[in-house]
Image (tube, rainbow, N blue to C red):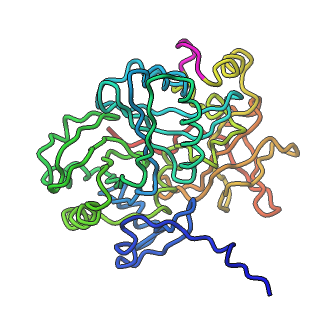
Amino acid sequence: MTTHDSAVVHLKRTPLYEQHLALGARMVEFSGWEMPVQYSGISEEHQAVRTAAGLFDVSHMGEFKVEGNAALAFLQYLVPNDLARLAIHQAIYTQLCLPTAGVIDDLLIYRLAEQQYMLVVNAGNIAHDLAWVQGQAQHFQGVTVTDQSETTALLALQGPSALSILQPLTEINLSSIRYYRCEAGLVDGISCIVSRTGYTGEDGFELYCAPVDVVKLWNDLLAAGKPAGLLPTGLGARDTLRLEAGMCLYGHELDEQTNPLEARLGWSVKLDKASFIGRDVLLAVKEQGPQKLLIGIELLERGVARGGYAIYNNEQCIGTLTSGGPGLTVHKNIGMGYVEAAYADVGRSVQIDIRGKRVAAQIVALPFYKRKK
């Protein structure tokens, strides 16, 4: 008799798992974690973030501490963006690249102190990223890399009401924290790093704290925000929000076969700094032009675009969608994907193959949605 017990996958859970169940969340597998995809409904949660606020549990994300007198030199070699201009309490968006310039992951790097940095990586890539970062760190004397994923919980409070909901719970002057900056201090009596960042296209904050404190912080934020229309928000709306904002999702718009220039992330690649992993390839791509380019598409006929659907220019297949779905704020069916660079011009008519039927679409500029400042 054979047993298949060894094939049973034990999903990881965040410290808020019981809270999600109590709120009636529908739980799904995501990157090896059991996570809430929705509570009241994706559309309602999406609109709450656009018009009031949403609260996300993103404790599944990974955090690594990089410190030591060679920390800056190491990180400069590790990533294509330029950390030399990073002030203390400032964050930067960048990628981990292979020597081929393919993307291992995209991440945020915070400079928390003179020689101390925090890397925030995607949940599904924690083990792979850690092995890569630690492996590269061996070439540098005076660098330590510590995985703090298990000892860090993370909440994202996003939407136009985020600041007014959060401010009564802290003495930190939130309006003085600029975009991609952070401050450390007490929120709701809990020691936090408060960062003005997010993945929704809205203003908002991300709060890093100890797992032991996150249940209280979550419950108190929900209670504080309820009069303003704050809703607990799941991964479903997180995806529809980031799609409208034209933000890449690892495993969809970014992977090891795609480089940052193809993904139109050239603004985060600083080719004029000293040597970094993948620089030579990126330099050549810059000179020759990318083979493929990320585009936005809008359907002109009925149908919903999904990742994996082929993109046609008449009878020629020119690329593939990487993400797609209803644009709940823009009221259009939208998608992102890659096409051969020669076909990537905005305004071009294309067709999306939806289950064997060609549906008229148009290439449009990204992002689909931009909040009014």
**Location of residue 289 with respect to 293 vertically, above or below:** above
Dominant secondary structure (helix, strand or loop) of the stretch shown in magenta: loop
Magenta residues?
A: 270-276
* Camera-nearest residue between 250 and 201: 250
Does the magenta segment cover residue 273?
A: yes
Quadrant location of the C terminus in the rendered image: top left
Picture residue at 31% right of the left edge, 47% below the top: 204
Where residue 186 sits in the image (x, y, percent)? 17, 48
Where residue 31 sits in the image (x, y, percent)? 57, 59
Q: Is residue 98 left or right of residue 244?
A: right
Question: How many numbered badges does the structure rendering display?
Answer: 0
Picture residue at 21% right of the left edge, 65% below the top: 220
* Camera-nearest residue between 265 and 171: 171
* Camera-nearest residue between 258 and 69: 69
| Quarter of the figure with residue 39 | bottom left
Picture residue at 74% right of the left edge, 17% below the top: 288
Where residue 341 sits in the image (x, y, percent)? 74, 30
| Quarter of the figure with residue 317 | top right
Does the magenta segment cover residue 56?
A: no
Q: Residue furthest bottom?
A: 1
Picture residue at 33% right of the left edge, 60% below the top: 55
Quadrant location of the N terminus in the rendered image: bottom right
Q: Is residue 161 left or right of residue 73?
A: left
**Location of residue 194 with respect to 48 vertically, above or below:** above
